Image: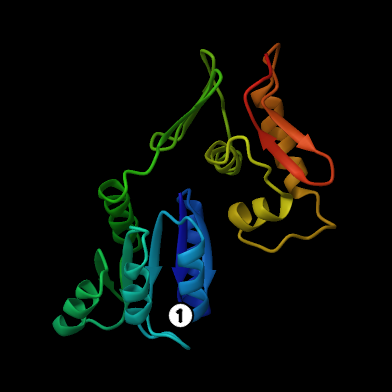
């Protein structure tokens, strides 16, 4: 699942990104309302978390503008504004839920799960050839054999399966899996993809994950 966090307090944003990433989500962060709105309107997020008090464009306006568009992405307000009037204003602006600071992180995760369940029914099961992935249960199998994947390997595989047949660059993987900008001098992406490929193609299995030299990777069904 890919989440967008619009939060100008960088300390809070860092804390939330770390916790949500450990919870299995890919998280993009924007620190002002204008860039956050642009991201929400151009990228296919599964959920948006937005603060109210933002520079350049406040969260209430961001929410209203998102709702003017065709996308029905769930929106969660996460803000220190805790009056009843504020909550009503936020929900009337189009938010699906409203959580006030300070908050319990476990409650935030529970609300995110609830919104994702009742939102646009996000896909939680993927199948490519004899490879199956269950996002809700965090399991992956190839044929009749369960694949023992690390949390990072699972997240990489999930991203590949959500983008089956599409070229995925190293920079995209670092942004969505590690939440950092791509460092051309680092081989961390290649190392983890190598780990994953060995588990996917163990034995006589047909290769599914391919390297496109100089461009990135692509996950696709084996050629007949």
Which residue is tagged 1? 33
At a point 78% along the width and 60% down the height, the residue shown is: 183
Nearest the camera: 22 or 186? Answer: 186
Q: Is residue 213 left or right of residue 28?
A: right
Residue 131 horizontal/vertical position (percent): 55, 23
Q: Is residue 162 left or right of residue 99?
A: right
Nearest the camera: 211 or 114? Answer: 211
Residue lying at the far bottom of the rendered structure: 56
- The quadrant in which residue 192 appears is top right
Q: Is residue 23 visible?
A: yes
Q: Is residue 148 left or right of residue 224?
A: left
At a point 67% along the width and 45% down the height, the residue shown is: 168
User: Is the C terminus in the top left, top right, bottom left or bottom right quadrant?
Assistant: top right
Residue 167 horizontal/vertical position (percent): 68, 42
Q: Is residue 173 left or right of residue 142?
A: right
Q: Is residue 143 above or below residue 71?
A: above
At a point 64% along the width and 25% down the height, the residue shown is: 200
Residue 12 horizontal/vertical position (percent): 46, 75
Q: Is residue 170 above or below residue 162?
A: below
Nearest the camera: 188 or 87? Answer: 87
Residue 100 horizontal/vertical position (percent): 27, 75
At a point 32% along the width and 43% down the height, the residue shown is: 121
Q: Mark 1: which secondary structure?
A: helix
Few, some or many C-alpha atoms within 10 Å of disc 1 (few <14, some 14-19, many ≥20)?
many
């Amino acid at each position: 699942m890919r989440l967008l966090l619009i939060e100008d307090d960088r300390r809070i944003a860092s804390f939330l990104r770390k916790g949500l990433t450990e919870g299995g989500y890919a998280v993009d962060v924007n620190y002002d309302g204008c860039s956050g709105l642009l991201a929400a309107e151009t990228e296919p997020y599964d959920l948006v978390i937005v603060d109210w008090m933002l520079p350049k464009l406040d969260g209430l306006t961001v929410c209203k503008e998102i709702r003017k568009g065709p996308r029905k992405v769930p929106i969660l307000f996460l803000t220190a504004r805790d009056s009843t009037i504020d909550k009503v204003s936020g929900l009337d602006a189009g938010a699906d839920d409203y959580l006030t600071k300070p908050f319990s992180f476990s409650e935030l995760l529970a609300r995110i799960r609830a919104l994702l369940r009742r939102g646009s029914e996000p896909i939680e099961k993927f199948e490519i050839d004899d490879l199956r992935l269950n996002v809700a249960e965090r399991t992956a199998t190839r044929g009749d054999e369960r694949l023992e994947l690390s949390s990072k390997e699972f997240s990489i595989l999930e991203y590949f399966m959500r983008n089956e047949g599409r070229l995925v660059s190293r920079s995209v993987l670092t942004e969505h899996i590690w939440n950092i900008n791509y460092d051309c001098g680092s081989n961390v992406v290649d190392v983890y993809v190598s780990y994953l490929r060995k588990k996917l193609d163990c034995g006589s299995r047909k290769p599914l994950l391919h390297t496109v030299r100089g461009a990135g990777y692509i996950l696709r069904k084996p050629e007949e």
